[in-house]
């Protein structure tokens, strides 16, 4: 008996898919082409078209070496120097205050501040009123006036600035005490006080111009002297608020006004009435006339003008 061998069933044949569309042939990428440099001011060295300093140096490196560019730079430099010289000649006298000179107006001490406040409020028996001169330690020549720290008669900017700021803050506080404070009152009071000071300085400068009055560092001296009035204004406002009765307020106002007027009358004498030595008789007559007009101007500013300005500041 024969045994039939067992065989596994055969698998069907494999069929691979046949593409229906032809496969395009592979192509290599196009070679990189560098841009051709056509700018005459950029050197054409290296593969990138720029010099060794990189792109920025290649763009602007030779620009400043070009003759036309050098001429333009020279013309611009000359125009700038000419404009600076014109400004210094025509406007330098109005803005000639250097930083060391301005700092000297704030060169004060505690003792000076106390003595100056006492002088502004009680100037009746003070002597002398002349400012002290500062001399060189080497040659002995006069170098100007001494700083406020060393001279009680010298004007300073510390007390006027602090008094101006105190007036604005005190006005706002008193408005709150009386129940009429609002956010805009601070800016209103500051603007009005600043406008009064500017108006006063312009009036002084106009009077000095019309009377041919000239003095070194005159503008800053006038600004300093115009700020001392705020001391009396502050005292008047405090007295009118915390002391009942308008009589006390008016008495304090009249006294501080008179003290400030007398202080300005004696202090501004060296500004409005500078010493002059004239020999000719005709010139002496002219000088006397100018002196008389300057005295009238000083009196009108110290008394009439200060009364109006201080009253406006107190009433505001």
Image: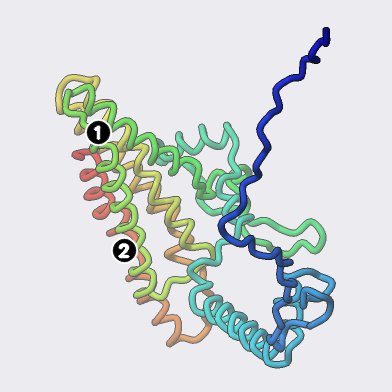
The image quadrant that residue 71 belongs to is: bottom right
Point 43% across, 57% down: residue:
222
User: In the structure shown, which secondary structural element does the residue marked by tag 2 occupy?
Assistant: helix
* 175 left or right of 54 in image: left
* 87 left or right of 178 in image: right
User: In the structure shown, which secondary structural element does the residue marked by tag 1 occupy?
Assistant: loop
| Alpha carbon distance from label 1 to label 2 | 32 Å
The quadrant the C terminus occupies is top left
Q: Position of residue 234 (x, y in %)?
A: 32, 34
* Residue at the farthest top position: 1
Q: Position of residue 88 (x, y in %)?
A: 55, 76
Q: Is residue 92 above or below residue 38?
A: above
The image quadrant that residue 253 belongs to is: top left
Residue 183 image label? 1
Q: Is residue 309 above or below residue 280?
A: above
Q: Is residue 77 above or below residue 177?
A: below
Q: Nearer the viewer, residue 111 or 237?
A: 237
For mark 1, does the 10 Å Cα neighbourhood hold few (<14), some (14 to 19), or many (20 or more) residues?
few
**How many marks do you count on the picture?**
2
The quadrant the N terminus occupies is top right
Point 44% across, 65% down: residue:
273
Q: Earlier in the sequence, mark 1 or mark 2?
A: 1
> How is the model colour-coded?
rainbow
For mark 2, does the 10 Å Cα neighbourhood hold few (<14), some (14 to 19), or many (20 or more) residues?
some
Q: Nearer the viewer, mark 1 or mark 2?
A: 1
Point 64% across, 56% down: residue:
133
Q: On the image, numbered disc 2 is attached to which residue? A: 203
* 261 left or right of 251 in image: right
Q: Position of residue 305 (x, y in %)?
A: 26, 54
């Amino acid at each position: 008996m024969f045994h039939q061998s067992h065989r596994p069933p055969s698998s069907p044949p494999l069929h691979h898919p046949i593409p229906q569309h032809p496969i395009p042939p592979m192509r290599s990428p196009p070679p990189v082409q560098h841009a051709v440099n056509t700018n005459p001011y950029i050197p054409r060295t290296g593969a990138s078209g720029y010099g060794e300093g990189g792109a920025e140096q290649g763009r602007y490196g030779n620009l400043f070496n070009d003759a036309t560019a050098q001429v333009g730079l020279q013309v611009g430099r000359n125009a700038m120097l000419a404009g600076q010289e014109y400004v210094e000649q025509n406007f330098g006298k109005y803005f000639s205050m250097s930083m060391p000179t301005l700092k000297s107006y704030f060169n004060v001490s505690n003792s000076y501040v106390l003595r100056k406040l006492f002088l502004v409020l009680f100037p009746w028996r003070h002597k002398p009123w002349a400012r002290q001169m500062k001399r060189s330690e080497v040659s002995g020549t006069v170098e100007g006036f001494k700083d406020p720290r060393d001279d009680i008669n010298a004007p300073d900017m510390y007390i006027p600035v602090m008094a101006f700021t105190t007036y604005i803050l005190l006005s706002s506080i008193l408005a709150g005490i009386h129940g009429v404070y609002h956010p805009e009152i601070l800016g209103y009071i500051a603007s009005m006080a600043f406008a009064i000071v500017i108006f006063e300085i312009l009036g002084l400068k106009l009077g000095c111009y019309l009377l041919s009055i000239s003095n070194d560092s005159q503008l800053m001296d006038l600004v300093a002297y115009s700020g001392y009035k705020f001391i009396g204004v502050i005292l008047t406002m405090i007295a009118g608020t915390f002391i009942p009765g308008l009589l006390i307020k008016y008495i304090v106002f009249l006294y501080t006004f008179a003290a400030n007027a007398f202080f300005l009358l004696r202090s501004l004498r060296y500004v409005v009435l500078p010493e002059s030595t004239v020999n000719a008789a005709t010139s002496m007559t002219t000088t006397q006339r100018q002196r008389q007009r300057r005295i009238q101007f000083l009196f009108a500013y110290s008394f009439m003008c200060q009364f109006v300005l201080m009253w406006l500041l107190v009433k505001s």
